Image (cartoon, helix red, strand yellow):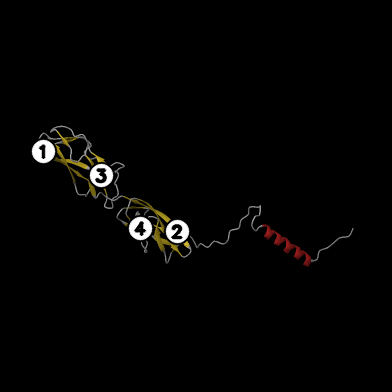
Amino acid sequence: MKRHTISPAAFALVAIVAGACVVLASCGGSSSGASTTGPSTSGPPLTIVLPASQMTSGTTIQASAMLGSSAATNVAWSSSDALVAAVNAAGVITGTRAGIATITAVSGNSTGTTTVQVNAGPPAVLSYYQGEGQIAPAGSFLADPLCTLVKDAAGNLIIGVAVTYTVATGGGIIREPLSPKTDARGVAVSGGFSLGPTPGVQTVIATSGTAPPLVFHETAQ
C-alpha cells in the first residue's frame, strides 16, 4: 500500500485555505449565530458621589465625580430634569420641584449616573382650598369644614404637615381635629366649625410653621 505524504509547505497552504473558509463562513448570514464584539471605547468606570441621595427643595448639594480613587477632571454635568434638580458646571445640584432626577457626569470616555430625590420644603404659602366665606345662622354649624392648601416656596404641595386652626373672633367653636395634617392633596381639613352667637363676620386663623397665617372669614346671620 502506497502512502502519500504532505510537505510542510502544502500543509501550511491547506491551513491558510481552511482559515479563509472559516472567516468567509462567519461573514454575514452564518447560521451559527455567533457574534463578535469589538473593543470597548468606554473608559474606566466613573462614580458620582453625593452627600445624600435625597434633598429638600430650595437647598443645594455638591456632587463629585471619581475615576477609581482619583477625582475625575474636565467633568461635564447634566440633569434629566432641571425643573426638579438642576446641576451646574461645578457639580452643584439645586433642588426645586419635588420629584426624582438623574444626574450624569462625563469625563473623557467615562460616564456615570446617579439619581437624586427632591422633597418638598417647609410650609411657605397657605391658601384657601374650601370653607372660606360661608354664611349660616348664628350658633349653627357650617356646611363645609375649613380646608387649607399648603405649599413650599417652590410651589410644591406638602404632605403630612400639621395646620392649626384657632378661633380669632366671634366666639365660634371648632371640633377636633384642631391641628390636622395635610393629606395627599396637600390639604389640611379642620373639624366642624360652629359659629358663635353674635351675628356678623367671625374669623378663624390657620397656621403652619413659619408660613404667613391664613384667615378664614365666616358670616353669622
Label whose residue precedes the other's in the sequence (3 or 2): 2
Residues at marks 1 and 4 touching, judged by CB atoms closer than 8 Å: no
Q: Residue at (41%, 63%) from the top-left corner?
A: 76
Residue 173, which numbered label?
none
Q: Dot 3 lies on which element? A: strand
Q: How crowded is mark 2: few (under 14 residues within 10 Å), some or many (20 or more)?
A: some
Vertical relation: 156 (above or below) 199 = below
Q: What residue type is labelled 2?
A: Gly
Q: How far apart are marks 1 and 2 (CA)?
A: 65 Å
Q: Which of marks 3 and 1 is in front?
A: 1
- Residue at which label 4 appears: 86
Q: Residue at (45%, 58%) from the top-left corner?
A: 112
Q: Which amino acid does label 1 sit on?
A: Gly
- Residue at which label 1 appears: 200
**Quarter placement of the N terminus:** bottom right
Q: Which amino acid does label 3 sit on?
A: Leu
Residue 149, which numbered label?
3
Q: How crowded is mark 3: few (under 14 residues within 10 Å), some or many (20 or more)?
A: many
Q: Please indicate whether residue 148 sits to the left or right of residue 219 in the image.
A: right
Task: Give the farthest residue toward the left.
Answer: 198
Q: How far apart are marks 3 and 1 (CA)?
A: 26 Å
Q: What residue type is labelled 4?
A: Ala
